[in-house]
Amino acid sequence: MISGEKIKRLHGTSWKDFFKIYPIYENLKKSKLFKLSLFLCFIFSCFSFYSESSFVLLVKVNELNLSIIPNVLGFALGGYAMLIGGFSDSILSKLVKIDAEEYNTFQKTSATFGVALLSMCVSLILNYLIKWFINTEISNHFSLTNHFALLINVSVIFIINIISIYSIFLTINIVKNIFAFSQFISGMKTIEKVIKENKKNSK
């Protein structure tokens, strides 16, 4: 029988517990979508050096991200709401084991959605801060050489691009997880129906 201490350990609510369920560093190393995001950002950054104005490019990229990310975030939130609402008591009772030694499927699926939402929130906040920085024209108070300003602009473009592109690509995982979730629910309901039919026929 699992102890109360172990139940508490497996159901913590801190960020530390969140990243135990979803070890982000290990998953990023294995993620093809993250590698694709890095590759695209590297290509985009190379082209940034040839842009007529790296600052104008930064403004355009920032505006593009701010126009897309909120919509992507809304889609992800809808998927997450579907996930939480779809797990009935009967299904959860089958997932939760009293002798469990590790995190269950519901926790892992929820954490996967959580990472996608977190990535999108970070992207939105970062792009908002860049937009605020641009609109306040704080950079006008600094005396920078053209080469140094170019390097800063390209670096910022790379950073906001990688988090934004990866956040957009995560919608692919969300679609996949929603499909897997629907298949799981369908399978569980089918099993329940088969068991009921077998009981009825055995009488």
Image (cartoon, grey):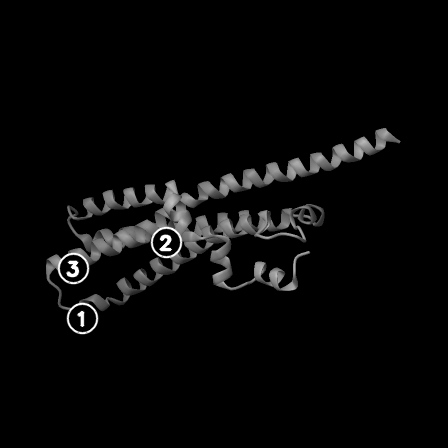
C-alpha separation, residue under disc 2 versus residue under disc 3: 23 Å
Q: Amino acid at mark 2?
A: Leu
Q: Position of residue 180 (x, y in %)?
A: 56, 38
Name the residue rendered at 21%, 53% in the picture.
Answer: 154
Q: Amino acid at mark 3?
A: Ala
Q: Position of residue 22 (x, y in %)?
A: 48, 52
Q: Position of residue 189 (x, y in %)?
A: 70, 38
- Secondary structure state at the residue bearing disc 2: helix
Q: Amino acid at mark 1?
A: His
C-alpha separation, residue under disc 2 versus residue under disc 1: 25 Å
- Secondary structure state at the residue bearing disc 3: helix
Question: Is residue 182 left or right of 175 when viewed as pictured?
Answer: right
Which residue is identified by label 1? 141
Disc with the residue nearer the chain's start (1 vs 3): 1
Disc with the residue nearer the chain's start (2 vs 1): 2
* Numbered circle sitting on residue 149: 3
Around disc 2, counting alpha carbons within 10 Å, would you say few (fewer than 14), some (14 to 19), or many (20 or more)? some
Disc with the residue nearer the chain's start (2 vs 3): 2
Q: Position of residue 143 (x, y in %)?
A: 13, 68
- Secondary structure state at the residue bearing disc 1: helix
C-alpha separation, residue under disc 1 versus residue under disc 3: 13 Å
Task: Using the rendered view, name the quadrant where residue 141 is placed.
Answer: bottom left
Which quarter of the image is occupied by the N terminus? bottom right
* Numbered circle sitting on residue 66: 2
Give the vertical position of 137 relative to 154 (above or below).
below
Foreground tag (2 vs 3): 3
Seen as rendered, the residue at the extreme bottom is 141
Name the residue rendered at 66%, 50% in the picture.
Answer: 97
